[in-house]
Structure formats: structure tokens, C-alpha cells
């Protein structure tokens, strides 16, 4: 028989109060033309950071990354981000909207890509990593990038500086 753990009312109230800003309900109009936030296509893995909403979508017959400004309620052009030969997924964006990371699959290999909106440069962040990767994310200030990697034969979380240098994070002994 399983024992149920009861959460004290004070702890539950504290938890609910701390989560009052999340999840956020957004009210954007539906746009059949695909120029707005809501469309008839699959909108996958949305990530909200400040005024920016980044997500993967198959709006135009291929899975690309889209950026939307919640303040102006307009899509933001991201030249050089999407590619005809890649499937993009799991995007994450910095608080200021400058950097976007995402998982991109080309020729059966998935890598983490870093896009700089200021320079319009796209960089394969895990090109030298011989492993499968998934679920990339970037810190709010853009200084660190984390993702899951199968490099050790299991799914581990790797954390890197934006420059590409791995962070030395000690692991607690078992």
C-alpha cells in the first residue's frame, strides 16, 4: 500500500503564490496566414523570455524556428537562422532576445545551434561532440548553454560557456 504525503496548507499556499506568474496565459489573435503567433500549424516547444516568444513550427511545410515580440505583437525577422536542409526544434532565447539556441537535425545528426541576432550568425555549437543531444537551453543573460548529451552512454546534462568552453561542475559523490 502506498503512503500518501500530505502537503501542509501553508506550504501549498506558498507554492501557489510563488507560481502566480507562471504559467502565463497569452491572448493573441488567430492568423490563418501564419504571420501571427497563433496559426493552424503545429507550434512546438514555445519558450517565453521577457517580451520574446520563440518556438518551432511547421507553418510553411518545414519545421523552422520563429520569433515573436509579445510587446509589439509582431513576428521578428531572423535572417540566416533557418535552413532548408535542417529540422529545427526545442528553441530557447535570452531575456534580451539577442541569442537563440535550438536543436537542429541535418542528415540524421542533431546538434545544438547558437544564433546571434545582432551579428546574424549561426554557429554549430556541438560540431565536435560525438554524441546525440537534446533539449538545449540558454541562460537569461546568454552566458551559459546547457543541453542533454549521450556522450557517456547515458543522458547527462552538459553546461558550456557561450564561447564553447565546458564548465567544470563538480558532481556530488554517491
Image (cartoon, rainbow, N blue to C red):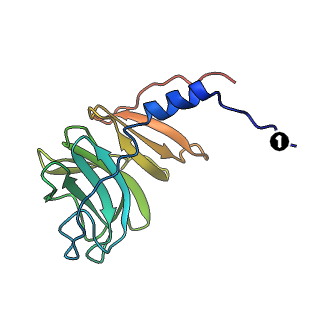
Instruction: Tell me the SS state at disc 1.
Output: loop
**Side (left or right) of 49 relative to 167:** left
**In this image, 161 relative to 51: left or right?**
right
Residue occupying the far right of the picture: 1
From the image, which quarter does the C terminus lie in? top right
Residue closest to the eye, 139 or 128: 139
Q: Quadrant of residue 116?
A: top left
The answer to which of 140 and 31 lies nearer the viewer is 31
- Residue 78 percent coordinates (x, y): 16, 57
Please state the horizontal and vertical placement of residue 130, each as a whole percent of the image. Answer: 47, 50
**Taking 144 as reference, is 91 above or below it?**
below
Relative to 71, say whether 165 is above or below.
Answer: above
**Which of the pair 128/8 is nearer the observer?**
8
Number of marks in the image?
1
- Give coordinates of residue 76: x percent, y percent: 14, 56
From the top left corner, tell me how far across and down residue 98 is, in percent. Answer: 18, 42
* Badge 1: residue crowd in 10 Å (few <14, some 14–19, many ≥20): few
The N terminus sits in image quarter: top right
Residue under circle 1?
2
Q: Quadrant of residue 10?
A: top right
In this rendering, the answer to whether 102 lies above or below 152 is below
Residue 48 is at least partly visible in this image: yes
Q: Residue at x 31, y 57 (%)?
A: 55
Amino acid at each position: 500500500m502506498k503512503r500518501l504525503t500530505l502537503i501542509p496548507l501553508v506550504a501549498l499556499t506558498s507554492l501557489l503564490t510563488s507560481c502566480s506568474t507562471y504559467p502565463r496565459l497569452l491572448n493573441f489573435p488567430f492568423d490563418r496566414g501564419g504571420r501571427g503567433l497563433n496559426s493552424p500549424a503545429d507550434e512546438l516547444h514555445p519558450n517565453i523570455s521577457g517580451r520574446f516568444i520563440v518556438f518551432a513550427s511547421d507553418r510553411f511545410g518545414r519545421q523552422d524556428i520563429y520569433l515573436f515580440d509579445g510587446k509589439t505583437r509582431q513576428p521578428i525577422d531572423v535572417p540566416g537562422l533557418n535552413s532548408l536542409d535542417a529540422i529545427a526544434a526545442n528553441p530557447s532565447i535570452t531575456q534580451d532576445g539577442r541569442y537563440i539556441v535550438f536543436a537542429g537535425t541535418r542528415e540524421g545528426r542533431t546538434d545544438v545551434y547558437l544564433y546571434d541576432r545582432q551579428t546574424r550568425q549561426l554557429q554549430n555549437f556541438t560540431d565536435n561532440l560525438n554524441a546525440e543531444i537534446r533539449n538545449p537551453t540558454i541562460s537569461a543573460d546568454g552566458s551559459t548553454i546547457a543541453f542533454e548529451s549521450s556522450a557517456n552512454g547515458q543522458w547527462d546534462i552538459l553546461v558550456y560557456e557561450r564561447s564553447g568552453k565546458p564548465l567544470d561542475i563538480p558532481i556530488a559523490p554517491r
